[in-house]
Amino acid sequence: MPVTIKTPEEIEKMRIAGRLGSEVLDYITPFVKPGVTTGEIDRLCHDYMVNVQGTVPAPLNYTPPGHVPYPKSICTSVNHQVCHGIPGDRLLKNGDVVNLDITVIKDGWHGDTSRMFMVGDVSIQARRLTQITYEAMWLGISKVRPGASLGDIGHAIQKHAEGHGFSVVREFCGHGIGASFHEDPQVLHYGKPGTGLKLEAGMIFTIEPMINAGKKDIRQLGDGWTIVTRDHSLSAQWEHTVLVTGTGYEVLTVSAGSPPPPDFIAQAA
Ligand code: MF3
Ligand code: CO
Ligand code: CO
């Protein structure tokens, strides 16, 4: 499938979907505490999306080729879970780190974003992995402009992660997004500068690095979805949906509660 260039009208709808996705994370933040179950977090997010926002949770019953339908409305990936953790009876406890990944559909358009949450007092190691992964995502985002290549993004992420002794998961990548949840291009979180697709204004894709504290290898659990690190080391992930503008980038998945970009990202005046 070719990479689509969104029209100004489509971009406006993607801005709305992106903000709504981010607002689900704002809403759920105060509930992410020791003693809550991942299933309760899913139920709260589901009800907020459907009853307050009037959005559709894209994960619910999502069935890509080779998968059973995804049974819940969000993904909750705890500690050594890399991505696609299925919410359920698991209780969050002091010291856990959890990624909450939200994808909403509004007016037919998708907004896809995730953040890490620290539950109570978290180890220095887990905090460092979470912070370096956040910086890696932003270093990737900062490469986005017309004429840059996908390899520039992947390289920036890989260099930062590996430079701090961490590893980049290879099997999952960012993706084009719009009227479909997952579109071309595939946005690898590793690579070489100047290689791969050249970016053009109007492209929209996610950047969502999964970074492991130990080895990069993963495996899938018997539920058909949950991905874990093979060596059971911690894994972190952050995700934004990003538009290529005429001169650079615009992050679409922003809201009042979005964590600020790292200091090395120049702020618009
Ligand atoms: N939100 C994930 C992504 O960033 C995809 C989740 S698919 C699901 O691409 F079915 F597990 F929800
Ligand atoms: Co995504
Ligand atoms: Co996502």
Image (tube, grey):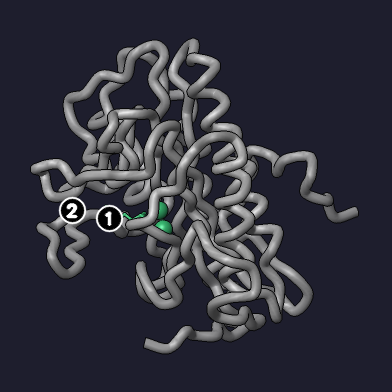
Other residues around mark 1 within 10 Å, as few (<14) / some (14–19) / many (≥20): many
> Residue lying farthest right?
269
Percent x, y for residue 56? 32, 58
**Residue 19, numbered circle:** none
- The reply, left or right, for residue 8 in relation to residue 2 is right
- Which residue is labeled 1 in the image? 59
Q: Is residue 93 above or below residue 104?
A: above
Percent x, y for residue 203? 57, 78
Residue at 39% across, 11% down: 94
Give residue 124's quadrant in the image.
top right
Ligand 1 has an atom within 8 Å of the beta carbon of the residue at disc 1: yes
Amino acid type at image mark 2: Tyr
Query: Which SS class for mark 2?
Result: loop
> Could you tell me if the residues under marks 1 and 2 are in contact, i.e. CB atoms within 8 Å?
yes
Percent x, y for residue 133? 55, 40
Amino acid type at image mark 1: Pro
Q: Is residue 92 visible?
A: yes
Ligand 1 has an atom within 8 Å of the beta carbon of the residue at disc 2: yes
- Which residue is labeled 2 in the image? 70
